Image (cartoon, rainbow, N blue to C red):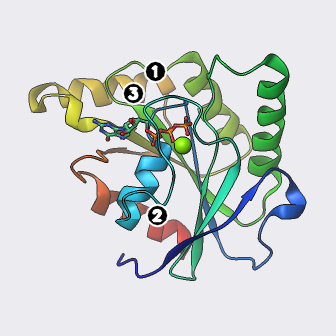
Amino acid sequence: MKVNQAEIVISAVSKKQYPNDRLPEIALAGRSNVGKSSFINKMIQRKSLARTSSKPGKTQTLNFYKINETFYFVDVPGYGYAKVSKKEREAWGRMIEEYLVERENLRATALVVDIRHEPTVDDVKMYHFLKHHDLRVLVIATKLDKIPKGKRTKHIQRVIQTLDLDQDDTVIPFSSETGEGKDHAWKTLQLYLK
Ligand code: GTP
Ligand code: MG
């Protein structure tokens, strides 16, 4: 997809702030610092529309990015970030859960995992949470540039096995550094946006 236009519409913390123009939405979920915001930037060829950081916990609200006036990427705070208080973590959890479970415009969730590591217990929980709620899941195995070519297949297999992926779920090896996987990701997302 050629992206001509991209803008942040709102950083929401509650339902009443969500956009009400009924455009389809694609959410990003995953561990803190895994590369969700970087994924959005790479997909839309904007260096820093979605704010990123080498420190975890950068995205703290539901950020709605309107793309080509046709759909939204919804950047979601990461899980597993130890430095926030328990209370704050619970509030984020409720905010994310409410969005994922109740949002009618949500067409699919891109679950972003780090291809270098075995998916964590939280990743497995998130995958099964999404499946349990009959939400469409696309797994993005990012930071592919950090794995030598000869070892990639093994790492992808480990992602599939640990998440216990359904056969019809897609895993896309991806790199926000090199852009590998970008075309594949767009093709898959466009199917969901139809
Ligand atoms: P939170 O907002 O804290 O949940 O994090 P996030 O998942 O949005 O991660 P973010 O996009 O901010 O990226 C975290 C760090 O990982 C940054 O330093 C990025 O530059 C780096 N990063 C993200 N994607 C890639 C990638 O594909 N390859 C490499 N080498 N680094 C990446
Ligand atoms: Mg982020």
Q: Position of residue 125 (x, y in %)?
A: 64, 25
Q: Secondary structure at mark 2?
A: helix
Q: Which residue is mark 1?
A: 162
Q: Residue at x 64, y 16 (%)?
A: 82
Quarter of the view holding residue 60: top right
Q: Is residue 21 visible?
A: yes
Badge 1 element? helix
Identify residue type, mark 3: Val
Q: On screen, 145 above or below 81?
A: below
- The reply to whether callout 1 and callout 3 are in contact (CB within 8 Å) is yes
Q: Is residue 168 visible?
A: no
Q: Is residue 174 left or right of residue 161?
A: left
Q: Which residue is identified by label 3?
A: 159
Q: Secondary structure at mark 3?
A: helix
Disc assigned to residue 189: 2
Give how far across and how far down residue 110 sits, in percent.
52, 48
Q: Is residue 58 above or below residue 181?
A: above
Q: Which mark is residue 67?
A: none
Tag 1: amino acid: Thr
Image quarter of residue 157: top left
- Residue 176 at what x, y percent from top left? 31, 48
**Pick the front one: 12 or 182:** 12
